Image (cartoon, rainbow, N blue to C red):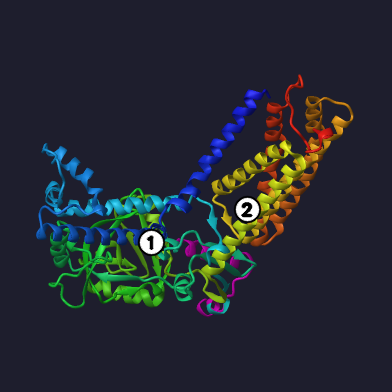
Amino acid sequence: MKKTGRVLLVLLVLVVAALLLYPTIKWYCFIPESTKEAAAGSNENIRDYSRGQASRGVRTLTSLLKSDQDSAIPEEYGFLIPVAEDYLKEDGKEIPDEWNVYALLSAFPTESSLFESIESHYRDDLLEAKKLSGNVLQLGLDLRGGMSVVLEADTASYASLHDGEVPTGAELTSMLESDIDILTSRIDQFGVTEPDIRLQGSDQILVEVPGETDPERVDSFLMGRGSLTFNLVDTSLTERVNNDYLRNLSRAFDEDGNVVTPGYIPSGYTVAGYYTEDEYGIDELEQFVVIDSTEVLDGTHLTSAEVERDPRSGRPAVTFHLDSEGADIFYDFTSAHIGKQLAVVMDGRVKSVATINDAISGDVQLSGSFTDEEAQSLAVVLQTSSLPIPLTVVSEQGVGATLGNDSVSMAIKAITLGFALVILCMIIYYSAAGVIADIALLLNLVMMVAVLSALHFTLTLSSIAGLVLTLGMAIDANVIIYERIKEEKKAGMTDYEAVKAGFDRAFWTIMDSNVTTIIAAVILLIFGSSTVKGFANTLAIGVVCSLFTSLFVSHLLFDFFVTEDGRRSVWLSWRRHER
């Protein structure tokens, strides 16, 4: 390849590396901690937080308007000015020269539009941060802190519920894999970013939850059956609440984002939101539903749920199955309330509302305007109320955040010190040629971190060890090449010829040593534990990057400084006769 082509390739690698590193750098250096904490919650947490901030914003601005119409707009609500300008332009009104609270609130057609504008601002910021967090170099359990829990299949409990039948072998493995799917589906409900849930051995599940150190909260996530209930709907109260709240959403929620129950709602009834999921995965408020607080049935009687087709409409529907006790309860209730509406409530939020047309026993079908994705999502929600095979906690260990912070700090110091010593030694021993090796080593580090970031790799103590080791090993290739160049010069070659011969003849030696290292890393990936795999991943990526930087980048830099006519060269030593 010609020199121009090689230069363009290196520049392309640098640009790609910068693009891959950008999310990680932005997340860890420019995103406030408060935003990170809020974005780490579930979509529902983000929605509740955004609605709470919107309610607070409406109340704050309204209070300022009442006290002084000429009050300045608080800096934190400056983002509303462009929105207000858009409203004025749509209505053909003049934009004021100076903005104050009165001018701002006058631009919004309704209080609900103001509420929605504030809510969308906070929501968009947090959703963007949450999306960014999924594209960065993650910190593992040992660095960030959290919980490590081992769960074991409770075959005895399963047998007591299934006439003494004890699952084994492939059947047990299949049930545990279904358990893993269900536990994974609870992630968003739990508000945890990417916990690691995987099969361990033949009858255990290992769960690692970074950033979470509350055992009770983790237990509720892992062992809880979900708060699935069926409640009767009061249609007249529902209509009244929607007339009051949908026109003024700021009155519907408190500052914590919880639905406010109006004073005219009698004791024994609750107001819940009915949400539908939009294309961004966010639950959007469709309406409010007033439900009887008395539960008709809870999720403990649910045995399974799956997506089927409504035989009459052909549209997707969700069918769930009840145990014998639940079937009797549901049949008696639906027989007595034909023509009334029943709400399916999950964790305090209405997931579906259906009219009871007939008495229903063991199998219940929920149909409506579901898409395939929506029906599948609802089936997953219903299935999280129970696990195919019960689990028991075998061990539960917490990793404190202090240990994680200390580990990160020590790792950064180790990498910095090791990198500085390698740079210094190369310059002392190889003079100007050492600088070329150091540039290649720096690019090697950038490329490694960029690849790890692109793969959304989880950085652990073992992977940091692999990173530090790889940096130390990466310089070996340059040492082999430089010593070979020295030998060629002693044999009488010119600097240009010695450099060319040095790189050519050292190529296979470097390839052999690095290929054997990659083979060892692959074996560790196949047979090693999760900790060993982290080390092996980093080692393999580092070896590949070091091959590129030592054999390609270093050679390119030498070609720039060593000319064929001998007018320019690069010193390989501080000693005069070896220059």
Say whether residue 479 is left or right of residue 98: right
Q: Residue at x 86, y 34 (%)?
A: 487
The amino acid beneath tag 1 is Thr
Question: Where's residue 472, x and y in %?
Answer: 72, 50
Magenta span contains residue 444: no
Q: Residue at the right extreme? A: 491
Residue hosting label 2: 416
Question: Where's residue 498, x and y in %?
Answer: 81, 28
The answer to whether 548 is drawn above or below residue 252 in the figure is: above
Question: Where's residue 314, x and y in %?
Answer: 34, 49
Question: Where's residue 381, x and y in %?
Answer: 40, 62
Earlier-in-chain disc, 2 versus 1: 1
Label 1: which secondary element: strand
Q: In terms of depth relative to the viewer, which is nearer, 408 or 513?
A: 408
Q: Give the residues drawn in magenta, as a range.
A: 158-185
Residue hosting label 1: 319
Disc number for residue 210:
none
Quadrant into which the N terminus falls: top right
Q: Is residue 19 visible?
A: yes
Q: Residue at x 33, y 71 (%)?
A: 229
Q: Tell me the CA gap for discs 2 and 1.
A: 58 Å
Q: Residue at x 73, y 47 (%)?
A: 425
Q: Nearer the viewer, mark 2 or mark 1?
A: 2
The amino acid beneath tag 2 is Thr
